[in-house]
Amino acid sequence: MNSKEQKRLVITRKLMENAKEQTDLPSELEQDLENLELQRRMKQLELESKFLKNQNDELV
């Protein structure tokens, strides 16, 4: 294998690694968004629970 072929192989490998990183990134962002949505939902449920407890305390 000559020097040009080796350089081409190295460049191709780098390009493939970069492409893989770029395709991995959206799935990581998607996971982050799902986690944020779950955190938001848990906070909402916590607030609803406090509200219902207060309502219940007022009725008793």
Image (spheres, grey):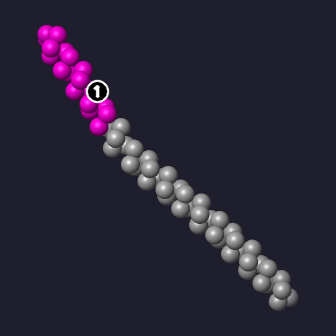
Quarter occupied by residue 46? bottom right
State the residue lying farthest toward the right.
60
Give the structural element (helix, strand or loop) at label 1: helix
Left/right of residue 28 with respect to residue 41 in the rendered view: left
Amino acid type at circle 1 is Lys
Q: Is 18 covered by the magenta stretch?
A: yes
Label the magenta part by its dominant secondary structure. Answer: helix
Residue located at (53% from left, 56% from top): 35
| Magenta residues, start to end | 1-19
Residue located at (34% from left, 41% from top): 22
Which image quadrant: the N terminus?
top left
Residue located at (63% from left, 69% from top): 44
Q: Position of residue 37 (x, y in %)?
A: 53, 62
Q: Residues within 10 Å of mark 1 (few under 14, many from 20)?
A: few
Left/right of residue 41 with respect to residue 22 in the rendered view: right
How many dots with numbers?
A: 1
Q: Position of residue 21 (x, y in %)?
A: 36, 37
Q: Position of residue 50 (x, y in %)?
A: 75, 74
From the image, tell me which residue sits under label 1. Answer: 14
Q: Position of residue 26 (x, y in %)?
A: 38, 48
Quarter occupied by residue 16? top left
The answer to whether residue 57 is above or below residue 9 is below
